Amino acid sequence: MPTAYKRVKTAAKLLPFDLARPAIRFCALQRPSGALVYQPADGSNLSVEQFDRLKAELESGYSGAGTAGRPMLLEGGLDWKAMALTPKDMDFMEARHGAARDIALAFGVPPMLLGIPGDLTYANYAEANRAFYRLTVLPLIQRMTGAIGAWLGGHLGDAEVKLGIDLDAVEGLSAEREALWARVSAADFLGRDEKRQAVGYGRDD
């Protein structure tokens, strides 16, 4: 199974959760869930027909994001008992951030770059951006250029075509490039041509 398909499949499982939760929370007006309790005065139980009818009415009239928070019309003997934790105890926003964080990681994007809090993998934005280029963007480009080169070679009489990446032109790697130049410049034991080769240039003929 291709890697790209696996990432999309993983993110697809989380996307409905991320999109539906705000709608449900808004429509429900932060009301906790609960259960209907049948407490008649004579202590009897619901008949099978009454139970099935009540269950069908609940599923059709009070299920889903569109009906969340709708007031219930109860008959005699029925009482609503809250069971779930209150919204203060359950951090809904953190749950949404968690889903968004998992989606971002499925595509190799550091959550910090998308403004999702709670990710402590990288110390700052610059490190996260550099890791995004190194671990996600560049490998993807290398696979694409390899496939394009092979396709071009097949159309040019099986010639070997190689497409490269000018890493010096990648803005996200500028900090690495500056650090490399500083180290090479400070290396007094290297000659001029050796320094040029160390930073990716040929000999100065």
Image (cartoon, grey):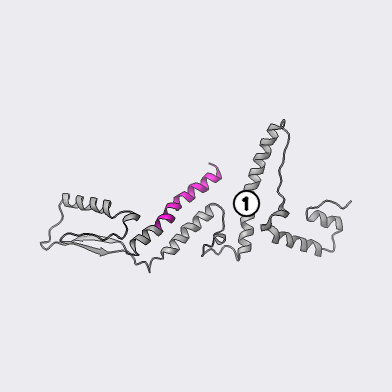
Q: Name, please, the residue furthest toward the bottom.
A: 88
At a point 33% along the width and 55% down the height, the residue shown is 66
Horizontally, residue 124 falls left or right of residue 23, namely: right
Horizontally, residue 133 falls left or right of residue 191, namely: left
Query: What kind of secondary structure does the magenta stretch mostly adopt?
Result: helix
Q: Name, please, the residue furthest toward the left.
A: 42
| Frontmost residue, 21 versus 41 | 21
The crowd level at tag 1 (other Cα within 10 Å; few <14, some 14-19, many 20+) is: some
Horizontally, residue 30 falls left or right of residue 103, namely: left
At a point 55% along the width and 45% down the height, the residue shown is 4
Horizontally, residue 8 falls left or right of residue 138, namely: left
Please state the horizontal and vertical placement of residue 116, each as a whole percent of the image. Answer: 52, 62
| Frontmost residue, 34 versus 29 | 29
At a point 47% along the width and 60% down the height, the residue shown is 98
SS at mark 1 in the image: helix
Please state the horizontal and vertical placement of residue 168, each as a whole percent of the image. Answer: 73, 54
Q: Quadrant of residue 155?
A: top right
Q: Name, please, the residue furthest toward the top.
A: 157
Please state the horizontal and vertical placement of residue 102, each as a whole percent of the image. Answer: 49, 56
Q: Which residue is mark 1?
A: 137
At a point 55% along the width and 64% down the height, the residue shown is 120
Please state the horizontal and vertical placement of residue 77, each as a whole percent of the image. Answer: 16, 61
Asked if the stretch drawn in magenta spans residue 192, the answer is no
- The magenta span reads 1-21
Disc 1 residue type?
Val
Q: Quadrant of residue 88?
A: bottom left
| Frontmost residue, 47 versus 16 | 16
- Count the marks: 1
